[in-house]
Amino acid sequence: MASIKGPGHIEPTISGSDLRIGIVHARWNTTVISPLVSGAKERMLALGVKEENITIEAVPGSYELPFAVTRLYAASQIQSSAATSGAAALDLLAGDAPDTLPNVGTKPFDAIIAIGCLIKGETMHFEYICEAVSTSLMKIQLDLGIPVIFGVLACMTDAQALARAGVTEGGHNHGLDWGEAAVEMGAKSRLWN
Ligand code: DLZ
């Protein structure tokens, strides 16, 4: 019997053509992370997001994701106001603008996807990091008022993680779902503004 799990179908009217989306991913468990990031990007491109409007940044591990999401969004806001304000434009010319920030473009992110993969080990690390990261990412999206897509796998085994990255037969790449969720929530949060 086919699985009943999954996000169902996105409304066909939703387009990502005007959205700016960030991906922040951990490097820990790279074999799993790389296909998840590629899957998220592939789905966003298929839903119309322009390649130049997708920014991808890496951090060492999942524990760094909440901080990175917060700072990346702030950077995108600063660059956005620099791009739209005359005074800031003069600063830009004078070299005072935050031009050393990552490529976060000229408008703030409509959504940010946080991607990580936690795999249970012998110690309590897994429990502490899972709890801290999931609670923080929820708080951040409510505080910032932008969708933060929860792309953090919490797996008991390597095999579970590989299946959820679509690497093993019969698996499914959850990055595809996270890319779709980012487009849907980015578009809807604009409408609900
Ligand atoms: C330390 C650690 C451990 C044990 N396991 C993982 C993991 O499974 N997945 C992951 O993304 N990160 C792990 N980390 C690293 C922490 O997230 C963090 O990068 C370090 O503790 C430094 O703050």
Image (cartoon, helix red, strand yellow):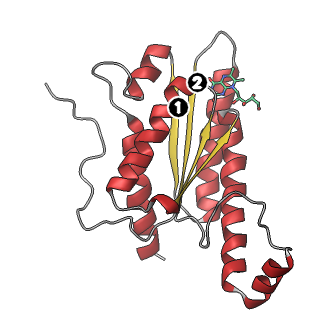
For badge 2, the amino acid type reads Asn
Question: How far apart are the two marked residues, 1 and 2, measured between alpha carbons?
Answer: 6 Å
Residue at (25%, 61%) from the top-left corner?
11
Res. 134 image quadrant: top right
The residue lying toward the viewer, choosing from 118 and 18, is 18
Give the image location of residue 16, x and y in percent: 38, 64
For badge 1, the amino acid type reads Ile
Q: Are marks 1 and 2 in contact (CB under 8 Å)?
A: yes
Give the image location of residue 104, x and y in percent: 64, 62
Label 2 residue near ligand 1, CB within 8 Å: yes
Does residue 153 appear in this view? no
Res. 192 image quadrant: bottom left
Res. 18 image quadrant: bottom left
Give the farthest residue toward the bottom.
86
Ligand 1 positioned in quadrant: top right
Few, some or many residues within 10 Å of mark 2 (<14, 14–19, 20+): some
Q: Which residue is mark 1?
A: 33
Q: Which mark is residue 29?
A: 2
